[in-house]
């Protein structure tokens, strides 16, 4: 999936700098969600934590798509 994301981002922007920035941002965001999700799944029900994490990831995908559709 990361390969295809990188390919599409580079195809749209034609810039390796923007590609690196966006893929780095995605990685940092994913890592932070993994850490927060791990702590929250120890405290709350795992099903609720998974639903919230997927909701946040879905919204971040929508923001990314809207950013590139504006560009």
Image: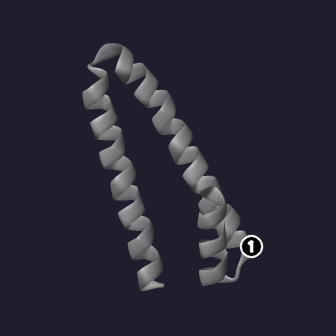
In the rendered image, the vertical position of residue 10 relative to residue 2, given as above or below: below
The image shows residue 62 at horizontal and vertical percentages of 36, 65
**What's the coloring here?**
one colour
Residue 32, position in %: x, y?
51, 37
Image: 10 above or below 47 = below
Asked where in the image residue 65 lies, by quadrant, the reply is bottom left
Report the residue marked by disc 1: 16
Query: Residue sitting at 47 percent across and 78 percent down?
Result: 68
The residue positioned 25% from the left and 29% from the top of the image is: 48
Looking at the image, residue 11 sits to the left or right of residue 40; the answer is: right
The residue shown at (28%, 38%) is: 51
Residue at the extreme top of the image, as rendered = 42
Vertical relation: 58 (above or below) 50: below
Residue at 58%, 45% in the rendered image:
28
Say whether residue 33 is left or right of residue 49.
right
Q: Is residue 48 above or below residue 45?
A: below
Q: Secondary structure at mark 1?
A: helix
Q: Is residue 42 left or right of residue 26?
A: left
Which of the two residues, 28 or 10, is positioned nearer the viewer here? Answer: 10
Task: Report whether 61 appears left or right of 21.
Answer: left
Q: Quadrant of the N terminus?
A: bottom right
Few, some or many C-alpha atoms within 10 Å of disc 1 (few <14, some 14-19, many ≥20)? few
The total of numbered circles placed on residues is: 1
Residue 46 in the image, given as x and y percentages of width and height: 31, 23
Residue farthest to the right?
Answer: 16
């Amino acid at each position: 999936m990361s390969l295809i994301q990188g390919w599409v981002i580079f195809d749209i922007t034609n810039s390796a700098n923007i590609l690196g920035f966006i893929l780095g941002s995605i990685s940092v965001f994913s890592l932070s969600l993994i850490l927060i999700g791990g702590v929250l799944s120890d405290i709350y029900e795992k099903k609720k934590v998974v639903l919230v994490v997927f909701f946040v990831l879905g919204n971040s995908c929508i923001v990314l798509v809207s950013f590139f559709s504006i560009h």
